[in-house]
Amino acid sequence: MTFSIVGYDPVEKEWGIAVQSKFLGVGAVVPWAKAGVGAVATQSYANTAYGPKALEMMAEGKSAQETLDLILVGDPDKEMRQVGLIDAEGNAAMFTGSACYDWAGGVTGTHFTAQGNILVDEKTVAAMAETFQQAKGSLAGRLLAALDAGQEAGGDSRGKQSAALLVVKENGGYGGFNDRYIDLRVDDHPEPIKELIRVYQLQQLYFAPSNPEKVKAVEGEVKEEVIRQLVRLDYLPGDFGDDEALYRAVTTYLHTENFEMREQKPGWIDLEVLEFMKQQV
């Protein structure tokens, strides 16, 4: 009922899964990951015990293939299962049971495994594999590009409903308190992958650090635009007075809209935040 890709970034030390399905809330079932350990996608009459069991085994030092062999032992319904794993070193393993509904199968390669069942045909996993290997940028971006390519190549033969993206990184979560670097879900939507990409772009806007090249002084045309938008959005009266009042209004806006990660010293602003302001209604 699902297609997914599990991947690893050896430079950033990130593990992640992107998944789509004609199934409500697929993000609550398929993706499992732990920083420094690995990532798992369990699907097709998913045995959700595979997720924590596989992570526990890989945390003990077992490889993805060793872990896969062990979790399948003792499952009387294993031929109905499909699962893909990446271990701590980025090694991939994948299993598709003989009782999975056609089309079902997958592709493994360096630092990734792509798999799916009830697909239009094998082109979905082939497109995911090719796109992931060719794409540049972050692990999250590559996983999403691969998922989108899989959908364009055919996807789930029954249609679309939900999608999810999970990427883990040591101390990558909010405030550095856990490893949930990116954890996004679209539980019910006519275009779940496109919506997931949109939400991911928002997540990057809110939580990724500012690009130094896009941090500018609040002066000249930039200052005029900042004033225009703050007045329009009722953060600043038309007769606001001096620059101190302007800078306070900028700070109030940033804190109200949860842009603390994009906050600059007084008199400076991130142009990506300013662009977001211009889009608000």
Image: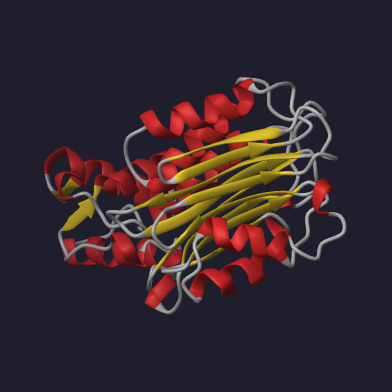
Residue 27 spot, x, y in % from top left: 68, 54
117 w.r.t. 257: above or below? above
220 w.r.t. 50: above or below? above
Front in this rendered view, residue 21 or 121: 121
Rendered residue at 71%/21% (across/down): 121
Among the 4 quarters of the image, the one containing residue 159: top right
Front in this rendered view, residue 95 or 218: 95
Residue 114 spot, x, y in % from top left: 57, 39
The quadrant of the picture occupied by the N terminus is: top right
Rendered residue at 38%/61% (across/down): 259
How many marks on residues?
A: 0
Residue 79 spot, x, y in % from top left: 82, 47
Q: Is residue 249 visible?
A: no
Rendered residue at 57%/69% (across/down): 55
Front in this rendered view, residue 19 or 55: 55
Scheme by which the image is coloured: secondary structure
Residue positioned most to the bottom:
177
Residue 113 spot, x, y in % from top left: 53, 42
Left or right side of 62 for 263:
left
Q: Can residue 21 be seen in this view?
A: yes
Rendered residue at 47%/44% (across/down): 112
Left or right side of 213 for 229:
right
